[in-house]
Image (cartoon, rainbow, N blue to C red):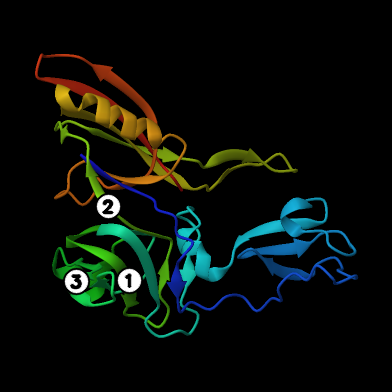
């Protein structure tokens, strides 16, 4: 069982193009309803005419926060928002850190992803390319009339070395999109027991409209993983402290590295410890996925 903590991504560099809205101007005196501005990498819509220096982030009565600009959606911690290429060829992102040895991507629409790895003086250490398409031919009907390939929604990619900077490039397709990009250090917790459970959470709701008709309103969905992890007793304090430090923050959890369905972007919802043996103990973790 390992995890990647989401790092501070203030230094994100990308060729993604943002929406064509002006920056908020503290000196402007006549903002009107439905004016759009960009402030602190977020988009705001004017909901009430206002005068000088009503900062959007501090005045919700006057401004509606519509979310991150296009370039920042990839790190806004929401899986269902996507940074879109919008005419840019080979959409790329650069992230820096002290020890980057793994990348996680989710809600991706691309044929493949290329990762260039650099050291502290910008020397190229290596390149890794991962195919995001999977063979979808199961029978002769699929061969003649079905889609030959299906896009994979996400991927955990170990890099095999420690880098200071990575450039992640989406390839394939006229329009490429990505919901979440995490690059950081793999940290080991312990050994995952086989028998973990993966739960599906559907947020669709039964709704009654104004005419009294009942229908199902489709919502988002997420997954929850319940994982038993065997930990050496000598390591209990370190693991407990690290997991407690993750409280209230997002991370990528990888219960089993060679099983592609198990990596999950989410948060630690619950943790219980069973002190079973003199040499090792069991942690039961509940990881709640984020939509």
Q: Which residue lies furthest to the front in this view?
A: 121
Q: Which residue is drawn at 39% across and 51% down?
A: 6
Say which element carries label 3.
strand
| Crowding at mark 2 (Cα within 10 Å: few <14, some 14-19, many 20+) | many
Tell me, yes or no, if residue 153 can be seen here.
no
Q: Which residue is drawn at 49% across and 48% down?
A: 220
Task: Please identify the quarter of the rendering in which residue 250 is found.
Answer: top left
Q: Is residue 223 above or below residue 166?
A: above
Spatial distance from mark 1 to mark 2, Cα to Cα?
Answer: 16 Å
Spatial distance from mark 3 to mark 2, Cα to Cα?
Answer: 17 Å
Q: Mark 3 points at which residue?
A: 128
Could you say where residue 238 lies in the image, as x and y percent from the top left?
Answer: 26, 30
Tell me, yes or no, if residue 202 can be seen here.
yes
| Sequence-earlier tag: 1 or 3 | 3
Q: How many marks?
A: 3
Q: Which mark is residue 185?
A: 2
Could you say where residue 3 lies in the image, as x and y percent from the top left?
Answer: 28, 44
| Sequence-earlier tag: 1 or 2 | 1
Q: Which-is-in-front pick, marks 3 and 2?
A: 2
Pointers 1 and 2 in contact (C-beta within 8 Å)? no
Pick the front one: 266 or 59: 59
Pointers 1 and 3 in contact (C-beta within 8 Å)? no
Could you say where residue 21 lies in the image, as x and y percent from the top left?
Answer: 69, 76
Q: Is residue 259 above or below residue 149?
A: above
Q: Is residue 285 above or below residue 278?
A: below
| Crowding at mark 3 (Cα within 10 Å: few <14, some 14-19, many 20+) | some
Q: Is 68 situated left or right of 103 in this image?
A: right
Q: Mark 1 points at which residue?
A: 168
Q: Residue at x 22, y 25 (%)?
A: 236
Say which element carries label 2.
loop
């Amino acid at each position: 069982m390992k995890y990647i903590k989401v790092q501070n991504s203030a230094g994100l560099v990308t060729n993604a193009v943002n929406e064509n809205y002006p920056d908020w101007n503290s000196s402007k005196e006549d903002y009107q309803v439905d004016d759009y501005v960009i402030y602190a990498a977020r988009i705001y819509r004017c909901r009430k005419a206002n005068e000088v220096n009503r900062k959007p982030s501090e005045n919700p009565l006057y401004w509606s926060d519509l979310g991150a600009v296009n370039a920042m959606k990839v790190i806004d911690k929401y899986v269902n928002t996507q940074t879109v290429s919008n005419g840019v060829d080979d959409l790329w992102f650069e992230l820096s850190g002290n020890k980057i040895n793994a990348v996680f991507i989710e809600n991706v629409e691309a044929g493949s992803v290329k990762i260039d790895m650099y050291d502290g003086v910008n020397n190229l250490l290596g390149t890794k390319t991962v195919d995001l398409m999977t063979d979808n031919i199961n029978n002769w009907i699929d061969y003649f009339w079905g889609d030959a390939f299906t896009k994979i929604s996400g991927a955990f990619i170990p890099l095999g070395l420690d880098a200071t900077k990575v450039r992640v490039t989406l390839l394939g397709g006229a329009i490429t999109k990505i919901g979440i990009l995490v690059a950081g250090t793999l940290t080991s917790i312990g050994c995952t027991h086989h028998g973990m459970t993966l739960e599906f959470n559907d947020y669709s709701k039964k709704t009654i409209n104004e005419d009294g008709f009942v229908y199902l309103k489709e919502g988002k969905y997420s997954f929850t993983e319940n994982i038993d992890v065997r930990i050496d007793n000598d390591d209990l304090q370190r693991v407990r402290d690290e997991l407690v430090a993750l409280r209230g923050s997002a991370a990528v959890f990888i219960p089993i590295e060679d099983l592609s369905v198990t990596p999950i972007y989410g948060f630690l919802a619950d943790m219980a410890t069973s002190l079973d043996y003199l040499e090792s103990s069991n942690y039961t973790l509940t990881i709640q996925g984020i939509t």
